[in-house]
Image (cartoon, rainbow, N blue to C red):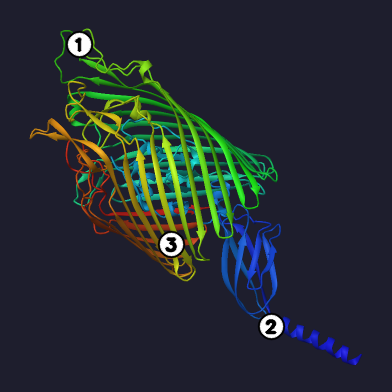
């Protein structure tokens, strides 16, 4: 009996001594933007696999930890997981704050179960709002050029048109908030979809390269999904304000953006407003580029929680653009008024089988006016064009849990485009008739054109141990029609110079798209993925129905063709990924695309169609040119996040050829005198290879971060003979940036772009109208952003 008592006393005494040597940790978990405590967050401490959950006040406590190094991992539904490394000391309890950032993918329903697919077999990039705040972003299309193999067509100071791996315009599916689509008014694409969204409204931009994200509409070359600020519920009523003020020296440009988030558990709201006023910039040679613009607008959203996990959100936006200059085009954008309406329903965890339900209905209205009144040649003919573009549609999707590791999405979507526009000319330079009136001419750009598209889609996701699979199919029924495509002469009586009746404009197509990607984890740090996608898109409103306007990069007017066939991209992608906390992360992607029924321009002789403008070379009509191919790669490497010195290196390359195309022959005066066929001509507007380096160093617990950037672009010598492309030169551009975070409420970002004041232009920049001179990029520009968060 005495022996047992002695043993019990020894055990108790040993535990008491041990308890005196241990430590612990307590913490507070909050929303990084609102400061609201997050309850029921899961807290894991390793080694030892200690775990707990936060209470209603967002606090947790884990005691009895032996001295040593530990990692604390915290996760909560709707937030990005947080991990911190700590050192436990004897007899000391550390209290640590854990602010958590909103998980955009959860709140916005972007790829709802992406956490179950870790390694995509295709290239996918997500840019968060903090990257936008750290840059002088005056235009989303310009900002997207940060992504490897994403370029943009510049025609002026703003409204750059994105290009992904050489695919552009309607070959890309550019959407807002998982399905809302807009139709720009301008036939020259002065106002692409990205120009109708304010950069400050963006919380994330998702870019998927290739014909793989078929859930969001017909997709041929890639998807750009812009996710805007959404209202969210709060435990109790509160209001939060965020403001961003920016300035750029070269443009003498200022911009302001305001965000207000607020509400309670049942009703919540968001409001954003923006204003940007920019002048003309100077290039590296000191030459002034006509690039000024003004933009302003606002968005209001109201959310209502009908029940737990059931939210309805209504949204209304107005965006305005005034006096946007385009030196590469024959006219400038005088007014652009955009209105967006949308209604969304989001349901989560409906039952064991039905995981998600999403529904979106929307309507967009664009009133676009452009003119040449600011140009010298308006003394000959004053031209004013007005276009009304409307688009309405819906998207409905159900997400199903098939089994533990399998998910199925099924849905339907629809859109309708209506477009009508005209061009009025006052012929100032022509002889006046006897009554003294100036001759006027009225021409149609579109004549009550309409496109309807009805789609069904499904996507299956499966992962188990070392394997991950994503497969999707899509079926679209597309119809198009227009009133007669006509151009009346000024003779008496007038003669129709085109003569396409309304009956001849109707077309209908049934398009099939599909993709499959499979990824194999080779070990804990390495994976290899292979994917194949077939994406088909019907011809655009421009390609089908435009009436004689210079819309391409060559100096020709283009005529629409209602008989065009759909264009298809058959693409193969291979993705290799390697990464660990010591080495960093590497991703290498290679792709090869085989394009069927490639759409381009075919020359029409003057005997068949004469141009309306005197300074163009002639007229081309959109036609299916046969087969083409594009191929290339992307490379990226990033150092581990745990080190204060960070480096990121990227490289990208794309090439493309068309199987056979007509190349025109010219005399010394620039007149077409013949043509011949060329095989494997280079495709036009393909960006050259480029390499980017980004170096940064975090000081004082990441309060101050200096950053250096370098971008090298090789010369583009592979140019299109058929499009009379001009080779572009190589260039190197350097930049500096300094980020200072005072606290969670205030931070400043300042820097200089084009540090050495280099005179250069991108290969996709258009030529100034009537010349062989390209629009040069801005010279040295100093900028500063002030960010307030209350």
Determine the secondary structure under disc 3.
strand
- The mark tally for this picture is 3
The first of marks 2 and 3 along the sequence is 2
The residues tagged by marks 2 and 1 sit, at their Cα atoms, a distance apart of: 102 Å
Identify the residue position indicated by label 1 in the image: 491
Residue neighbourhood size for the residue with mark 1, other residues' Cα within 10 Å, grouped as few (<14), some (14–19), many (≥20): few
In the image, farthest residue toward the bottom: 2
Residue at the disc numbered 2: 21
Mark 3–mark 1 contact, CB under 8 Å? no
Q: Residue furthest right?
A: 1
Closer to viewer: mark 2 or mark 1: 1
Mark 2 to mark 3: distance in Å? Answer: 40 Å
Front one among 536 and 690: 536
Find residue 751 and report its horizontal and vertical position in percent: 34, 58
What residue did someone put label 3 on?
740
- As helix, strand or loop, the secondary structure at mark 1 comes to loop
* Few, some or many residues within 10 Å of mark 3 (<14, 14–19, 20+): some
Query: Where 56 falls versus 203 (above or below)?
Result: below
């Amino acid at each position: 009996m005495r022996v047992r008592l002695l043993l019990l006393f020894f055990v108790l005494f040993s535990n008491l001594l041990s308890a005196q040597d241990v430590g612990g940790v307590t913490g507070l978990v909050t929303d990084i933007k609102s400061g609201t405590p997050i309850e029921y967050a899961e807290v894991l401490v390793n080694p030892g696999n200690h775990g707990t959950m936060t209470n209603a006040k967002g606090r947790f406590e884990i005691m009895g930890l032996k001295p040593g190094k530990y990692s604390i991992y915290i996760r909560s539904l709707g937030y990005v997981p947080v991990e911190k490394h700590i050192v436990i000391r004897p007899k000391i309890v550390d209290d640590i704050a854990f602010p958590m950032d909103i998980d955009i993918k959860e709140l916005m329903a972007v790829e709802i179960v992406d956490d179950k697919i870790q390694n995509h077999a295709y290239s996918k990039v997500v840019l968060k709002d903090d990257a936008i705040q750290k840059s002088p972003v005056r235009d989303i299309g310009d900002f997207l050029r940060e992504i490897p193999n994403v370029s943009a067509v510049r025609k002026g100071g703003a409204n750059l048109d994105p290009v992904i791996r050489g695919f552009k315009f309607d070959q890309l599916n550019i959407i807002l908030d998982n399905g809302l689509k807009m139709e720009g008014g301008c036939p020259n694409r002065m106002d692409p979809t990205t120009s109708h969204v304010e950069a400050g409204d963006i919380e994330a931009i998702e870019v998927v390269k290739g014909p793989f994200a078929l859930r969001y509409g017909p997709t041929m070359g890639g998807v750009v999904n812009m996710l805007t600020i959404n209202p969210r519920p709060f435990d109790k009523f509160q209001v939060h304000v965020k403001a961003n003020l920016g300035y750029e020296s070269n443009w003498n440009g200022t911009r302001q953006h305001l965000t207000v988030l607020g509400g309670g558990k049942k009703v919540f709201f968001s409001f954003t407003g923006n204003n940007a006023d920019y002048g003309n910039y100077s290039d590296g040679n000191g030459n002034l580029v006509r690039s000024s613009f003004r933009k302003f607008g606002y968005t209001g959203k109201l959310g209502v929680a009908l029940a737990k996990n059931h939210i309805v959100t209504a949204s209304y936006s107005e965006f305005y653009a005034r006096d946007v200059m385009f030196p590469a085009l024959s006219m400038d954008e005088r007014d652009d008024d955009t209105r967006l309406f949308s209604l969304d329903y989001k349901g989560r965890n409906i039952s064991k089988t039905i995981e998600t339900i999403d529904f979106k209905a929307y309507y967009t209205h664009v009133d676009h006016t452009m003119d040449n009144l600011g140009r010298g040649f308006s003394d000959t003919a004053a031209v004013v064009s007005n276009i009304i573009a409307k688009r309405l549609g819906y998207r409905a999707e159900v997400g199903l849990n098939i089994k533990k590791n399998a998910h199925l999405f099924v849905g339907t979507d629809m859109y309708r485009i209506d477009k009508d526009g005209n061009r009025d000319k006052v012929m100032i330079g022509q002889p006046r008739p006897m009554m003294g009136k100036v001759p006027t001419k009225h021409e149609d750009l579109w004549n009550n054109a309409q496109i309807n598209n009805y789609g069904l889609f499904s996507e299956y996701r499966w992962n188990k141990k070392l394997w991950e699979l994503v497969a999707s199919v899509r079926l679209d029924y597309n119809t198009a029609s227009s009133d007669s495509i006509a151009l009346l002469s000024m003779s008496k009586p007038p003669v129709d110079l085109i003569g396409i009746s309304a009956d001849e404009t109707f077309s209908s197509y049934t398009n099939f798209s599909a993709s499959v990607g499979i990824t194999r984890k080779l070990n804990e740090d390495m994976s290899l993925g292979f994917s194949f996608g077939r994406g088909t898109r019907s011809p655009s409103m421009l390609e089908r129905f435009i009436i004689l306007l210079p819309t391409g990069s060559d100096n020709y007017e283009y005529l629409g063709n209602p008989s065009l066939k759909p264009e298809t991209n058959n693409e193969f992608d291979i993705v290799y990924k390697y990464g660990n906390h010591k080495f960093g992360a590497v991703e290498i992607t290679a792709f090869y695309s085989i394009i069927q029924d490639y759409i381009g321009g075919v020359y029409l002789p003057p005997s068949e169609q004469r141009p309306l403008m005197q300074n163009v070379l002639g007229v081309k009509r959109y036609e299916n040119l046969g087969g083409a191919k594009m191929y290339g790669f992307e490379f990226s490497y990033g150092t581990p996040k745990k080190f204060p010195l960070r480096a990121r290196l990227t490289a990208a390359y794309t090439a493309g050829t068309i199987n056979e195309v007509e190349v025109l022959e010219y005399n010394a005066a620039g007149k077409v005198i013949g043509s011949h066929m060329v095989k494997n001509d280079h495709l036009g507007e393909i960006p050259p290879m480029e390499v980017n380096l980004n170096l940064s160093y975090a000081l004082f617990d990441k309060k101050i971060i200096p950053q250096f950037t370098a971008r090298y672009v090789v010369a583009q010598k592979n140019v299109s003979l058929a499009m009379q492309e001009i080779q572009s030169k190589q260039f190197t551009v350097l930049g500096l940036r300094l980020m200072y975070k005072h606290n969670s409420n205030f931070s400043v970002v300042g820097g200089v772009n084009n540090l050495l004041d280099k005179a250069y232009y991108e290969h996709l920049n258009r030529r100034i109208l009537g010349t062989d001179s390209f629009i040069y990029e801005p010279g040295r520009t100093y900028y500063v952003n002030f960010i307030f968060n209350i």
